[in-house]
Amino acid sequence: MIESYIKNLRVSMKSKSKISLTLFIIMSIMFIILIANILFNFRTYGIQSVENKAKAVAETIKHSLTSHMVNGVIDNRELFLSQIKKLGNIDEIWLARAPAVIKQFGEGFNNEIARDEIDTYVINTGIERSVVEDSIFGRSSYRITIPYVGRKQGKINCLQCHDSQEGETLGAISIAMSVDDIKDIGMKTVANTVLIAFILVCFILLFVNRLIGPFLTIFDSIKVVMQKAQEGNYSYRIEDAKGKESKEVAKWINGHLEKLQTTLDDIESKISDFLVHQKNLHQDPLIDVKRTVSRLSDIYRFRKTIEHDERTDEVYERLAFILREKFQLNDFNFIEADTTHKNTKIVYVEKEIHCEAHEGCRADRTNTIVDSCQFHNMCDKFNHGTNKKYICIPYSISNDMDFIVSFVAESQAEYDCLKDCVPYIQDYIEVAKPEIVSKNLMAMLEKSARTDALTGLFNRKYLEESIAKIVSQSKRSSVSYGILMADIDFFKMVNDTYGHDIGDEAIKIIAQTLIENTRDSDVVIRYGGEEFIVLLYNCDDKYIKEVAEKIRVAFSKKQIPVGNASITKTISIGASIFPTHTDSFWQCVKYADIALYNAKDTGRNKVVVFDKSLLKEGEMEESY
């Protein structure tokens, strides 16, 4: 804070110096212009005054010489001129005769001829001429030369005495006057003006500094604080406010900055509760908060969407969509690992399968990230012939399930991009975890509700829920279903003789026999007790007999262990075909049951296909 204060103070002093210097320069320029204008006007006025005086003296001399000439005392002109010269500021007076007058009367006293080019010019042209010789540090003078023109009109006829023409210049009168007194007065005036201006400038600078100093100080502090805030640092405060207004402004700004910093710090501390990975990309908390809120919004929408999905594979589809569209990934697999039964399976493939995950997954086994760039051929289950880079990341979903995401990259650039995305992908996987667990649990519960616990086969509830689908499919595709009703012969004797454990073992063996001798498209159901139903998909009379016989023979050969020995049992099977025998599914099940009882009544260990002749007299074909 001390360093910050010193820095702010330096900046503030710099701003004050700038403003003071700017004001000083502006006022100096103004005063220089003012002084220059005073000097110019003073000089012009002084020269004009001297000129008027010189012209008056020259005219006086001109008329006086004319009077002397008329009165015949022209020879006394030197005395007259010396008297005139004694007037104030007159340095010199001289006369210059024109060539015609010199020819007629001679050069006169003291060589009254043209002394310089000015005299010559005035005599030749008859035009008045004045010259100012100005020097800043030396003497300054004003010189005027006026012509004396011969006239014959008026009271005095100059041509009576001079052999000249009308309007011809007879001579010139030159007067040189000092202007040093005027210059001295001007210099004193300028000096006084400069002194007054300097005092005024100092007063204005002092007044401005006292008046706007506090505002400049807080302005500079605000500038520093805002600059740091622009860079993402909101810890700077205004420390050196002076004056009531400045202190109020500093209090407001510091209060807002304090609330902003506290809020940002609180948000940053809470982010880890929602996001696994939070990286400051811009070093500006506000921008990072904006991006974080955007991420949280995307993750929230993803979570709300998968909450309404019914199955785990739908969640995987949503997650794959995020990886494709948001992170621009196009080659990845999802793998489920059952940690209890030690088996793995690939549950989603985006592009192609790159490894033999079903034979064991290194990421699941080691519970660590498997990165091909750390060690070549790191996983022996991956197809390394493609020279692709891969990262397999395990996530613990529950106590008995791990979820592995296998990413594959074609190039180093794609791999680097993938590495940057992995922390953000984890946020979506963390959100998906509870949904995967809950949907797997629901699937397990549904399977448990529809599955026989002893054999693992579907139970009667499953059959009841599947009837509508089976009937609809049969009608839509014209597909027949064969219905086998199987029952172990003298099963009660097994339970009574050997116990229920041996009876349960017999039921497991018949279940295994039914599965081994049917297709994947067929459905095996434990209907109740020792009774089983087999639904044979797309079945006819010939096929149903073949399958039933195969099952009967196969079971009769099965050994049921009883301690150190074993026994064999037989089964009886009744069969019917839906919708050949009836378009009511449950009625067809009833027909298979009738055929089964016929097989038992006629000797057991046999297969009987339903025929209407098996119906007893008066038995109605009603729904079961």
Image (cartoon, rainbow, N blue to C red):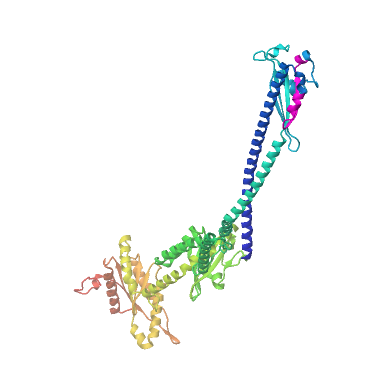
Front-most of residues 248 and 234: 248
**Residue 148 sits above or below residue 205 on the image:** above
Judge left or right: residue 496 versus residue 420: left
How far across and how far down the image is residue 63, in percent? 69, 21
How far across and how far down the image is residue 391, in percent? 56, 64
Residue drawn at 46 percent across, 61 percent down: 298
Q: Which quarter of the rendered picture does the N terminus lie within?
A: bottom right
How far across and how far down the image is residue 266, in percent? 51, 68
Residue 449 placement: quadrant: bottom left
Front-most of residues 527 and 127: 127
Front-most of residues 475 and 85: 85
Q: Is 498 included in the stretch rendered in magenta?
A: no
Q: Which residue is most to the left? A: 618
Q: Which residue is most to the right? A: 110
Judge left or right: residue 61 versus residue 350: right
Residue 350 seen anywhere in this rendered image of the structure: no
User: What number of labels is visible?
Assistant: 0
**Residue 497 sits above or below residue 152 on the image:** below
Residue drawn at 59 percent across, 53 percent down: 207
**Extent of the magenta region:** 79-102
**Residue 205 sits above or below residue 338 on the image:** above
Q: Which quarter of the rendered picture does the C terminus lie within?
A: bottom left
**Residue 409 sits above or below residue 430 on the image:** above
How far across and how far down the image is residue 261, in percent? 53, 65
Residue 601 seen anywhere in this rendered image of the structure: yes
